[in-house]
Image: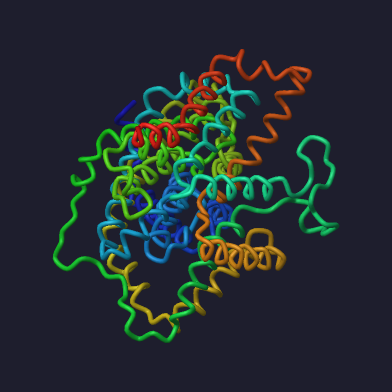
Amino acid sequence: MILEVLKTLFTPMNFLFLNVGLFSGIIVGALPGLTGTMCIALLLPLTYGMNSITSMLLLLGVYCGGIFGGSITAILINTPGTPASAATALDGYAMAKKGQAGRALHTALSASIVGGLFSTFVLLVAAPAIASFALKFGPVEYFALGVFGLTIISSVGGDSILKGLMMGMAGLFVSTIGLDPIDGIPRFSGNITELLGGIKIIPALIGLFAITEILNKGRNIFNTSETPIQIEGKTKTRFIDVLKYKMVLLKSSILGVFIGAVPGTGAAIASFLAYNEAKRTSKTPEEFGRGSEEAVVASEAANNAVTGATLIPLLTLGIPGDTNTAVLIGALTMQGIIPGPQLFVEQRSWVYAIMFGLILVNLFMYVQGKFLIKSFINVTKVPSNVMIPVLIVLCVIGAYAVNNNTFDALLMIIFGIFGYLMLKLKFPLTPMVIAIVLGPMVESNMRRALILSKGSWSIFVTRPISCVFLIIAVLMLFLPLIKKYLIRS
């Protein structure tokens, strides 16, 4: 069977479209607001009439390339191309400002490849077993997972835990705007029709990261003495360099696989969870947020490990792991392929061709990334008085493209002004971003769980998986306070 799979996979047409998909994904992923999902949807009609394996390799290339591409602008201009790269921006941009832009990009690329390959090997070996475990996650477990994720706020709140918690609460409030997820009643919408669908994550992210940074840079727009970010002179970076963080890579990849295999979560959640875990176990946690290479490794390994893991529920159960794989189901349907348990019996060679193809996607992504990194850095050499207007245009396009709605662009500007004012008052923005990402998952699943238990809160501690997550969450929440107490004593 292996020879048949390799013969089917190793064709010039497959290699061509795989690389076309990768290049498209990287470029689109790097543009703020233009996600890989959008690119997959745009290329979907092109797959009609293609060989099923060729079409899947094209779209998987877009998927993986889009996740990595988001880290490029996150590192170079503090503007995450996708929500999955929000955690990378925290330290990647700080590394770039210290003159380590090239190292940050190479580190992100290498960690992305490790995470992607790890999840692919897990997909090859243990797909059915992991899919069956992921099905055990109901509203109770999702709630506990979300609460665990929110405890990151206590460790990324900067010097003041109180200010971090206040921004976290602000983010949770923003996540409640719109229709009630259970009763369908409008909340905090101010009779504005556009707010009934809630605050979309992409306009909020672009506003809090990109517009805030643009407003900061705008004060020095005509400062000709400003030093552009540059790749280090003759400093060479190798793939093997990232392996010194082997435990961080392993833990982050495992977290990414776990999150990706649970339908309805996503790469943004995985990257923040991995970031928090890496900081918790790091020998130098004080470096996080100030340009930690270890932090970049953690977030990029986790968000790319999601890519292979989301295919686990897709191929074994026919359940999409995230929005990208939901679009992939459309591609499979066009090819007459029905994902599910019978796929491993009736079209076994096709399944393994896709799995081995995902390995090729990650390997070629490394080749393309290495080749393009020096071109990426040229973005930062553009003068501020040229760069800022271009960035504003890209941000507006990205926010508008979410729903083809000018209101989202207005929201983006509002979040940007708010973020700028909060930074001036020394309030951290990261807790707010985390709360906006995780808030809807926490609230909706808490409400569903209480409906199942007829209002009894005991359901959250009587379910083993939920109980474990909540215990860890409590420990993580009070860990900074415990550390401060021990230092004083």
Which of 301 and 274 lies nearest the eye of the viewer?
A: 274
Which residue is at 31% across, 40% downward? Answer: 114
Image point 64% across, 23% down: which residue?
A: 140
Q: Quadrant of residue 22?
A: bottom left
Of residues 128 and 232, the one drawn nearer to the viewer in this rendering: 232
Image location (x, y in percent) of residue 411: 67, 63
Picture quarter containing residue 237? bottom left
Q: Is residue 131 above or below residue 93?
A: above
- Give left or right: position of 319 versus 95: right
- The N terminus: image quadrant: top left
Q: Residue 479: where, in percent of width, then height?
A: 43, 32
Q: Residue 241 vs residue 411: left or right?
A: left
- Viewer-side residue, 95 vs 156: 156
Drawn side of residue 447 relative to residue 101, left or right? right
Q: Position of residue 270 (x, y in %)?
A: 47, 39
Residue 315 in percent (x, y) is at: 51, 30
Q: Quadrant of the C terminus?
A: top left
